[in-house]
């Protein structure tokens, strides 16, 4: 059973080109599914698996307090895996065909107000290379709506200052071109001219745009630590995530009249329904503003 799972992960890596985090998620979900199938259901091959076994596994997850979103993700992983087993002629039936996906509770993304974003962007002190780097990262994130994973994987050559855009590689190795405003471009140029060289000095040659104190590419965890510190400096009390500036970018664009399709393209969403969640955020925000400022609210 492990061999088929290993082959499936290899298929997702090589043929589908899925992002590292997505692959980790698939593997984690399917390993727990395999462990349950073996240890509880006593299955010795995937061809023995039936619909009832999958239902038992999902009930087991529900008993553990897993959310409907987590259950839906597991079902998607199991379904893809069994379709792969059919294609590879490992199994002669797909037991996941009639498994219903639970309706996920869709929580609205947390966003910062424009004033809070302004405070966060002003938090880095530009007295040394750290402040210049942090300022450039925050300005670029808010200017483009990139994911943090996309930001830290940028190379110097991905910034096209004269044309005013950045090239980034998103989920599924899909490339997209995103415009950058003058403020973010200025912050990046300041960092490149006065800051990056101090991180890179004495280290092996690297094309990475954002570096840590060792001269290596900044990690997601490294960025997260920086963001939490700057949010504290800016006295932002809301709970932040690495996606907060991405959510704020999309929401503020829509609040100011941007076209939904354009926002979808900049965010790199495959499905516009994913982008539409931000229209709900803007509606909630408009109601809050109305309630606060209208004299007869």
Image: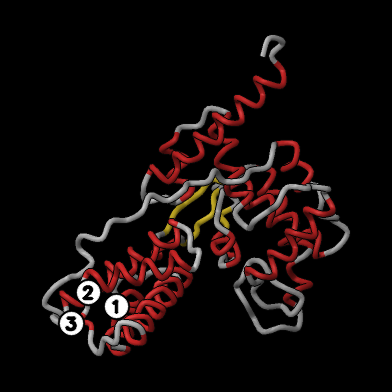
Q: Return the disc, 1 or 2, that comes first in the chain's sequence.
A: 1
Is label 2 or label 3 in front?
A: 3
Quarter of the figure with residue 83: bottom left
- Residue name at image x 40 percent, y 62 percent: 71
Q: Nearer the viewer, residue 107 or 232?
A: 107
Using the image as rendered, state which of residue 240 and residue 124 is in the foreground: 240
* Secondary structure category for the residue under label 1: helix
Answer yes or no: do the residues labelled 1 and 2 have beta carbons within 8 Å? yes
Q: Indicate the quadrant where residue 206 lies.
A: bottom right
* Between discs 3 and 1, the one toward the N terminus: 1
Cα gap from disc 3 to disc 1, whole angstroms: 19 Å
Which residue position is annotated with label 2? 84
Crowding near the residue tagged with mark 1, few <14, some 14–19, many ≥20 C-alpha atoms within 10 Å: some
Q: Which residue is mark 1?
A: 11
**Residue, x 27% and y 68% (percent of image)?**
80
For residue 83, side relative to residue 58 (left or right): left
Can you name the residue that lies furthest to the top here?
A: 296
Instruction: Report how far apart the C-alphas of labels 2 and 3 lie in the structure.
Output: 12 Å
Mark 3 secondary-structure assignment: helix
Residue 252 vertical position relative to residue 125 in the rendered view, above or below? above
How far across and how far down the image is residue 112, in percent? 68, 42
């Amino acid at each position: 059973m492990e061999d088929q799972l290993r082959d499936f992960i290899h298929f997702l890596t090589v043929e589908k080109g899925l992002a590292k985090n997505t692959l980790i998620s698939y593997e984690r979900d399917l390993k727990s599914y395999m462990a349950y199938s073996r240890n509880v259901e006593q299955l010795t091959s995937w061809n023995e698996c039936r619909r009832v076994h999958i239902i038992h596994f999902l009930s087991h997850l529900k008993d553990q307090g897993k959310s409907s979103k987590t259950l839906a993700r597991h079902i998607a992983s199991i379904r893809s895996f069994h379709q792969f087993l059919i294609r590879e002629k490992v199994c002669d039936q797909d037991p996941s065909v009639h498994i219903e996906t639970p309706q996920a509770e869709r929580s609205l993304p947390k966003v910062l107000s424009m004033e809070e974003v302004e405070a966060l962007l002003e938090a880095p002190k530009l007295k040394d290379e750290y402040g210049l780097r942090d300022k450039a990262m925050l300005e670029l994130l808010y200017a483009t709506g990139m994911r943090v994973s996309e930001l830290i994987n940028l190379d110097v050559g991905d910034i096209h200052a004269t044309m005013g855009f950045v090239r980034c590689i998103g989920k599924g190795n899909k490339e997209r071109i995103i415009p950058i405003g003058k403020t973010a471009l200025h912050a990046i140029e300041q960092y490149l001219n006065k800051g990056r060289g101090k991180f890179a000095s004495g280290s092996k040659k690297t094309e990475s745009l954002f570096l840590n104190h060792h001269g290596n590419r900044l990690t997601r965890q490294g960025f997260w630590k920086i963001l939490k510190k700057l949010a504290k400096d800016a006295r932002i009390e809301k709970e932040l995530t690495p996606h907060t500036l991405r959510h704020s970018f999309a929401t503020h664009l829509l609040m100011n009249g941007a076209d939904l399709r354009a926002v979808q393209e900049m965010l790199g969403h495959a499905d516009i329904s994913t982008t539409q969640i931000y229209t709900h955020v803007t509606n909630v925000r408009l109601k809050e503003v109305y309630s606060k400022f209208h004299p007869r609210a």
